[in-house]
Image (cartoon, rainbow, N blue to C red):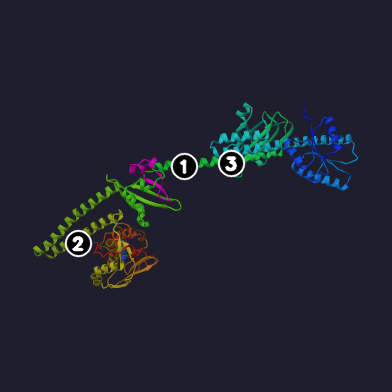
């Protein structure tokens, strides 16, 4: 049996109270009586009354403020005000604070009980309604929370999984679950862009799973993709969306990748007659965005993975050793070749400071040097004879990379070439020196006829030519092979003076007018003084050789933009325009060189090699009339003497 409703009577002691109490009990209510606010508070701690009958005036409080206070704490508690008299003012107050009823004398107990009964009924009905509403709202909130939870779970799944198939399958399942649909599918455009094939499905019939595909041009799903718009169908009778696949309701939204539709996400009901709401459609759209994010992630991952595999293949198969460092010189990457060079295990090197892992002193020198130039190329020599050319390349904002190239065989070639050069120069020059010596002895031993004198002179001239040719060839070989590595601070103006001293007798013989324009305060260049002397000797030697008697030679040296510009101009026959492109080729001689002019065509080739090995440039000034003398221009970079405190002495002639 249901418990009787408890009516709390908060009234002064009176006969009416006793009568009311009895009447309520006999009407099957249980009652409790308190006379003041303190009693009311105690009672409310002990039990929950279904209703309160509250006196207008109590010993320790007024009825209206007390009702107001009570309704603040228990808003649904029905309170009936028991007034001492009928008063409009009191009614207004009572209604303002929210009491449900108002009784006043003269009172009949039966009437009061009647009011209480009807008020309680109303209160019950209100309570039921409130409970129902709360339940409904709670259910709706729970549904939203569950939707959000599904979304969050799916979001995590997308972020955490690289398995696109499983993520897309989860997206379709979530769409079905959240919309309460019967089935769902995710369709993708094929490569031709004309057909949609099933990428993932949920609750689809088996026969559909195997053969489902749609034409983009004439299907509802195709329309969604074509026009990139959402479609919601709520049909009275089933409608076929694909052959043998009819739906009663459908939501289909486009799937966009980089703003381009690539497929569609659909949910449908084939059996149940349950229309989809706008909210359902919104959920499916959000899920389609999720699917697009997952596909984009997969695409980017695939891309980076392909690049990583390519890079790894290239990096590990590189013949040269390579070590990539971060800004603090910790090892980030190291390839197999580098591991083999230092006999190290790549697994144990990652993240460690390179100088701790690779203890080779030459590598330490490379990494602890500060000058940029010094950092660039460096040899690493091993006790077993291997030699590597190490190159240090800073990578701005990232760190640096060291590449190491095995030059052991080049070093061996170098040694062989040096031996060869040594042998050849000795073996070629010795007999020439002997021939020269014997021709001199010949002249001294017997008085020679004029013809014999002429023969001896010709032999000496030929031997001189061969010696020059041998020396030129050997020099060119050395310079071109890059063996000419000596570098000092050189004052070009001083070198010029030595060259001019050498050619002074010839200049005087031919009565050539020499004009020199230079300054002893020209900045230095960084180079090999012997080669720079050879360069000036060849250029000025040519000018003297090709300029006719009484001609002019101008030599100028000046500085411009941290470069020294040397200009050598003469009034010789000039260089025909057609010959100019070949003038620096080996053994090339100009078409206008008169028969019998000594020379081998190697001088300018040597000059060009020397200039280039000093990071300079050389050209013929074609602005000058080719038939009226030649002008050669050489440009060399200047060098700040702060870097080298020992300038070299001008060298002796190279030839
Ligand atoms: P060569 O031994 O013939 O002088 P070079 O290599 O020094 O060889 O010069 C190549 C050619 O360039 C010469 O044969 C000549 O035709 C031309 N040449 C070089 N310098 C001059 C110059 N000052 N005047 C005219 N022709 C020159």
Question: Residue 337 magenta-drawn?
Answer: yes
Q: CA distance from mark 2 to mark 3?
A: 87 Å
The C terminus lies in quadrant: bottom left
- Of the numbered discs 2 and 1, the one sitting upstream in the chain is 1
Characterize the local packing of mark 3: few (<14), some (14-19) or many (20 or more) Cα atoms within 10 angstroms: some
Would residue 393 be found to the left or right of residue 505 on screen?
Answer: right
Secondary structure at badge 1 equals helix
Characterize the local packing of mark 2: few (<14), some (14-19) or many (20 or more) Cα atoms within 10 angstroms: some
Secondary structure at badge 3 equals helix
Residue 201 shows in the view: yes
Dot 2 and dot 1 residues touching (CB under 8 Å) = no
Residue at 71% across / 39% down in the picture?
278
Dot 2 and dot 3 residues touching (CB under 8 Å) = no
Whether label 1 lies within 8 Å of ligand 1 gets the answer: no
Label 3 belongs to which residue? Answer: 293
Residue at 16% across / 60% down in the picture?
436
Q: In which quarter of the view is residue 466 placed?
A: bottom left
Q: Nearer the viewer, mark 2 or mark 1?
A: 1
> Toward the viewer: 366 or 553?
366
Q: Is residue 350 above or below residue 465?
A: above
> Toward the viewer: 469 or 448?
469
Question: Residue 336 magenta-drawn?
Answer: yes
Characterize the local packing of mark 1: few (<14), some (14-19) or many (20 or more) Cα atoms within 10 angstroms: few
Label 2 belongs to which residue? Answer: 461
Q: CA distance from mark 3 to mark 1?
A: 22 Å
Whether label 3 lies within 8 Å of ligand 1 gets the answer: no
- The disc placed on residue 308 is 1
Q: In which quarter of the view is residue 59 placed?
A: top right
Q: CA distance from mark 2 to mark 1?
A: 68 Å
The N terminus lies in quadrant: top right
Residue 122 location in percent, x, y? 82, 36
Residue 375 location in percent, x, y? 36, 54
């Amino acid at each position: 049996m249901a418990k009787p409703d408890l009516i709390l009577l908060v009234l002064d002691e009176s006969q009416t109270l006793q009568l009311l109490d009895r009447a309520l009990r006999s009407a099957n209510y249980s009652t409790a009586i308190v006379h003041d606010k303190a009693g009311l508070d105690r009672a409310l701690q002990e039990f929950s009354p279904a209703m309160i009958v509250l006196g207008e005036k109590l010993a320790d409080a007024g009825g209206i403020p007390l009702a107001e206070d009570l309704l603040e704490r228990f808003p649904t508690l029905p309170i009936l005000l028991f007034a001492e008299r009928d008063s409009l003012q009191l009614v207004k107050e009572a209604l303002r604070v929210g009491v449900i009823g108002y009784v006043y004398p003269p009172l009949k107990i039966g009437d009061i009980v009647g009011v209480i009964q009807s008020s309680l009924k109303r209160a019950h009905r209100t309570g039921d309604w409130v409970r129902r509403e709360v339940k409904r709202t709670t259910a709706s909130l729970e549904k939203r929370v569950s939707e959000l939870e599904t979304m969050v779970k799916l979001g995590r799944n997308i972020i955490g999984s690289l398995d696109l198939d499983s993520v897309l399958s989860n997206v379709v399942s979530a769409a079905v679950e959240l919309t309460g649909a019967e089935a769902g599918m995710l369709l993708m455009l094929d490569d031709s862009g004309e057909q949609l094939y099933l990428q993932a499905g949920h609750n689809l019939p088996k026969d559909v799973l195997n053969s489902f595909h749609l034409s983009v041009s004439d299907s509802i799903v195709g329309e969604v993709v074509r026009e990139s718009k959402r479609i919601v169908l709520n049909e009275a009778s089933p409608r076929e969306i694909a052959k043998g696949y009819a739906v009663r309701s459908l939501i289909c939204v486009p799937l966009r990748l980089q703003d381009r539709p690539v497929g569609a996400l659909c949910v449908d009901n084939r059996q149940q007659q349950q229309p989809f709401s706008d909210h359902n459609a919104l959920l499916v759209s959000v899920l389609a965005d999720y699917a697009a994010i997952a596909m984009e992630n997969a695409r980017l991952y695939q891309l980076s993975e392909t690049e990583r595999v390519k890079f790894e293949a290239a990096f590990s198969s590189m013949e040269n050793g390579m070590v990539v460092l971060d800004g603090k010189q910790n090892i980030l990457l190291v390839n197999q070749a580098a591991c083999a060079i230092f006999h190290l295990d790549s697994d144990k090197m990652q993240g460690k400071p390179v100088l701790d892992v690779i203890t080779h002193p030459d590598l330490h020198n490379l990494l602890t040097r500060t000058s940029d130039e010094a950092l660039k190329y460096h040899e690493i020599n091993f006790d077993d004879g291997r030699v590597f050319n190490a190159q240090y390349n800073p990578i701005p904002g990232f760190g640096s990379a060291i590449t190491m190239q095995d030059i052991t065989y080049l070093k061996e070639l170098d040694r062989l070439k040096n031996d060869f050069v040594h042998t050849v120069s000795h073996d070629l020059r010795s007999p020439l020196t002997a021939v020269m010596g014997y021709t001199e002895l010949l002249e001294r031993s017997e008085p020679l006829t004029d013809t014999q004198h002429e023969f001896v002179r010709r032999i000496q001239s030929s031997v001189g030519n061969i010696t020059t040719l041998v020396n030129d060839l050997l020099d060119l070989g050395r310079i071109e092979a890059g063996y000419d590595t000596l570098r000092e601070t050189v004052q070009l103006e001083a070198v010029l003076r030595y060259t001019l001293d050498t050619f002074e007798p010839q200049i005087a013989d031919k009565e050539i007018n020499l004009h020199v324009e230079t300054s002893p305060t020209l900045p230095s260049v960084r180079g090999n003084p012997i080669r720079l002397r050879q360069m000036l000797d060849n250029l000025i030697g040519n000018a003297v050789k090709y300029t006719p008697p009484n001609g002019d030679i101008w030599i100028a040296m000046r500085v411009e933009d941290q470069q020294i510009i040397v200009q050598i101009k003469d009034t010789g026959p000039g260089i025909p325009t057609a010959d100019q492109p070949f003038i620096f080729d080996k053994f090339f001689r100009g078409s206008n060189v008169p028969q019998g002019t000594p020379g081998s065509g190697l001088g300018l080739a040597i000059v060009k090699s020397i200039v280039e090995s000093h990071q300079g440039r050389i050209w013929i000034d074609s602005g000058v009339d080719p038939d009226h003398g030649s002008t050669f221009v050489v440009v060399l970079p200047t060098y700040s003497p702060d870097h080298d405190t020992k300038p070299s002495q001008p060298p002796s002639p190279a030839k």
